[in-house]
Image (spheres, rainbow, N blue to C red):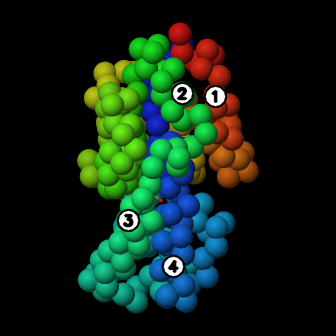
Amino acid sequence: KYECAIFDLDGVIVDTAKYHYFAWAALAKKLNINFTIKHNELLKGISREESLEVLLGYSGLINKFTREEKNQMMEEKNQLYLSYIEQIGRDELLEGALCLLETLRNRGVKIVLGSASKNAPLIMSKLGIETYFDVIVDGNLVKTAKPDPEVFIFGADKALVPYEKCVVFEDSIAGIQAALASNMFAVGIGTKEDMPLANEVISNLSQFDVDRFFC
Ligand code: G6P
Ligand code: MG
């Protein structure tokens, strides 16, 4: 059996992946870059900096901008994202999230957040769910973003749990890769088509069979 559950935030616990997408799509439109929901799959889970590089890469514009211009674009995207999440409340928690957190806490399972987002603490406090987590690792704390395993390794180390005793919940290709590279069990939230490498895929957290994994 496993001892620790590591959750990604955006698109796993809370329905914010769409807001990241809307904000990147607005920037892409301004720059005349063709950017669809399918292109967006590769942006999920990676850092703000790398997302911009991937987005610009879609257009061949990658070397056209100065560092300052890129910083300005990231700032603009983030301000738009912040405006979308300003009113966020518990109704934007994804199906099964709160119930699973409750169950895991009652069973004494270690609960860790492993997110690439620098806005994770803000969202957690707006939703009032920080208290469920034994360890919170977000984009402000890690140097190397997913698919690098750093975020999950750091979280498991802080929770004092061996990597092979951790189950990771992820909605991104990069996050599934990071979990597997950490020697953890990777549960994809979404579709098998989007996350073919996941150990298993469920459509939302209410589908997770807790008894199979945790005592
Ligand atoms: C998450 C999301 C990404 C987002 C990244 C950075 O992992 O899946 O879509 O770009 O975090 O988020 P931030 O809030 O720091 O810009
Ligand atoms: Mg995510």
Q: CA distance from mark 4 to mark 1?
A: 34 Å
Question: Can you see residue 11?
Answer: yes
* Disc 1 and disc 3 in contact, CB within 8 angstroms: no
* Left or right placement of residue 194 versus residue 13 in this view: right
Reading the image, the residue beneath label 4 is 26
Q: CA distance from mark 3 to mark 2?
A: 27 Å
SS under mark 4: helix
The residue at the point 32 percent across, 51 percent down is 122
Using the image, tell me which numbered label, if any, was put on residue 100: 2
Reading the image, the residue beneath label 1 is 208
Residue 39 drawn at (x, y percent): 61, 68
Q: Is residue 23 above or below residue 138?
A: below
* Disc 2 and disc 1 in contact, CB within 8 angstroms: yes
Nearest to N terminus: mark 1 or mark 3: 3
* Amino acid type of the residue tagged 2 in the rendering: Leu
1 vs 3, front mark: 3
The residue at the point 64 percent across, 73 percent down is 36
Residue 203 drawn at (x, y percent): 69, 41
Q: Is ligand 1 closer than 8 angstroms to the Cβ of mark 4?
A: no
* Amino acid type of the residue tagged 1 in the rendering: Phe
Nearest to N terminus: mark 4 or mark 2: 4
Nearest to N terminus: mark 4 or mark 1: 4
Q: Quadrant of residue 18?
A: bottom right
SS under mark 2: helix
SS under mark 3: helix
Foreground: 149 or 51? 51
- At label 4, counting other C-alpha atoms closer than 10 Å, the crowd grade (few under 14, some 14-19, many 20 or more) is some
